[in-house]
Amino acid sequence: ATEIKAVITLFGATGDLAHRKLYPSLFNLFRKGFLADNFALLGTSRSEWSDADFQAKVRESISKVDEDQAGQYDAFVKHFFYQPHDVTNPEHYDKLNERIAELEDKFATEGNRLFYMSMAPRFFGTIAANIKSQGLLSDNGFNRLVIEKPFGRDFASAQELNKELTETFDENQIFRIDHYLGKEMVQNISALRFGNTAIEALWNNQYIDNIQVTLSEDMGVEERAGYYDQSGALRDMVQNHIMQVVAQLAMEQPLTFTDQDIRAEKAKALRSLRKYTPSEAAANFVRGQYAAGDNNNEYRKEDGVDPKSITETYVAAKLTFDSYRWAGVPFYVRTGKLLAGKFTRVDVVFKKPLIDIFATPANSNDQKLNNNVLTIYIDPTPGFSLTLNAKKVGQGYTTEPIDLAFSQSAEQKDLSPEPYERLFHDALEGNSTNFASWSEIADAWQFVDVIRQVWDHEEPNFPNYQPGSMGPKEADELLARDGRQWVY
Ligand code: BG6
């Protein structure tokens, strides 16, 4: 492992994300040797903690990572420091700057500075402005910004935020987190496509009938109702995660496998996504909200949810790309809370052979060729499967579907870094392949804004789906009307 040298300044160090994901990820990078002697993390938030308090919290957060590594806990937490901080007070940044400089000396980090914003998004712009005005940018190492979602709540606010950030950081210094891009199998989409003639040669409208993307969750909104009721599934899952997965499926082959080329292709793919008119949006999008089930309240009765809320907890849609490769191939996508299971998958449905030569008069009753389906299992168990038609054992020539399947072993799964570990590593290395560029985000918002506007002006018939189902019946009708159905 190449050792990374940097001081990380974390805004939101007492937060839930930091505790659950960020410290364990950094610990993994530490025990694998990506981080060693020359790094430090300066945590900030409003709480009046001392360095010792902070180190105790970090220790607690990593205590579940790998108990065999307990011997390394002390060595790791010695790199953590804390500074109480009010993000709106410029003078507080002067203090931060002093402490960063001290840590740079102490840990010989060569002037590399990474700022990480993991707090209420309304402060993102203010923090960036103060980083610049109070001189926190390094002039002898790198300066990078990692920023958590949500990146705006519509195109206008995202654009405003981007403007604020780019006063301080260049586009190539900004790492916008979308944790789906840190998932093993999302990254594997490129390997599957561009590493296999048998796949990529068929990856177009001549051979593919439709593509289905499902991000299914079996939990409700839990304790995040305050955020979720203001957001809804369209903003929470479609604008970011679904768009990023779809972009990888739809993009052209990048010239080289570098962040610049890959991001350029993804951006191009999203530009070719047809931006719907309001009436197209109404026809091609379905929204849902969950009803009461055996073990749960209906959404409108959850703590923190407006009893008349029209926030959607489910979205299904038909997307269309105006590109030569994808003309005529619908991408059906869906996501929702309290569905039948927690899983993420992509089903690529190939066209049937033009003629079924096995359907002779003698066996025409039981003969039926199925569509080949390539499934990419993203979560929980990474893998692929491909259904083919094969001859049924015995006399005669009837066919039946068989399945070629690969799934990762438990051992491989253990070796596979968590999304946050990968993304933290990549940001520290300056590799932006798996971060969303401004152009991608802008297109995704412009696409989603139209849907939002249509929905915000019409009273939906909520609740409309049962917990444990795969969503409202309109989601099935969306495909049925094209003579298709969901594979799962
Ligand atoms: C987050 C959303 O971005 O992704 C959550 O805000 C959602 O609402 C989560 O539950 C799903 O992520 P994963 O990795 O569990 O599929």
Image (cartoon, grey):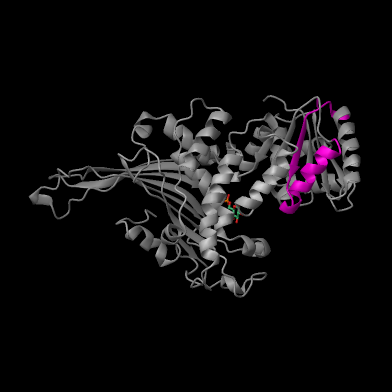
- Residue projecting furthest to the left: 361
Q: Is residue 67 visible?
A: no
Residue 171: image quadrant is top right
Instruction: Decide if residue 258 is on the left or right side of residue 44.
Output: left
Taking the magenta stretch, the answer to whether it contains residue 461 is no
Which contiguous range is marked in magenta? 106-135
Query: Which residue occupies 74% across, 51% down?
Result: 119
Residue 129: image quadrant is top right
Indicate the position of residue 148 as horizontal and vertical percent values. 68, 46
Of residues 155 and 285, the one drawn nearer to the viewer in this rendering: 155
Taking the magenta stretch, the answer to whether it contains residue 124 is yes
Indicate the position of residue 161 as horizontal and vertical percent values. 69, 47
Q: Is residue 460 above or below residue 392?
A: below
Query: Which residue occupies 51% across, 49% down?
Result: 242
Indicate the position of residue 245 as horizontal and vertical percent values. 50, 44
| Quadrant in which the N terminus appears | top right
| Quadrant in which the C terminus appears | bottom left
Q: Is residue 103 above or below residue 49?
A: above
Instruction: Decide if residue 136 is on the left or right side of residue 181.
Output: right
Instruction: Decide if residue 47 is on the left or right side of residue 394.
Output: right
Instruction: Decide if residue 50 is on the left or right side of residue 238.
Output: right
| Figure label count | 0
Indicate the position of residue 120 as horizontal and vertical percent values. 74, 53
Q: Is residue 153 visible?
A: yes
Of residues 275 and 39, the one drawn nearer to the viewer in this rendering: 275
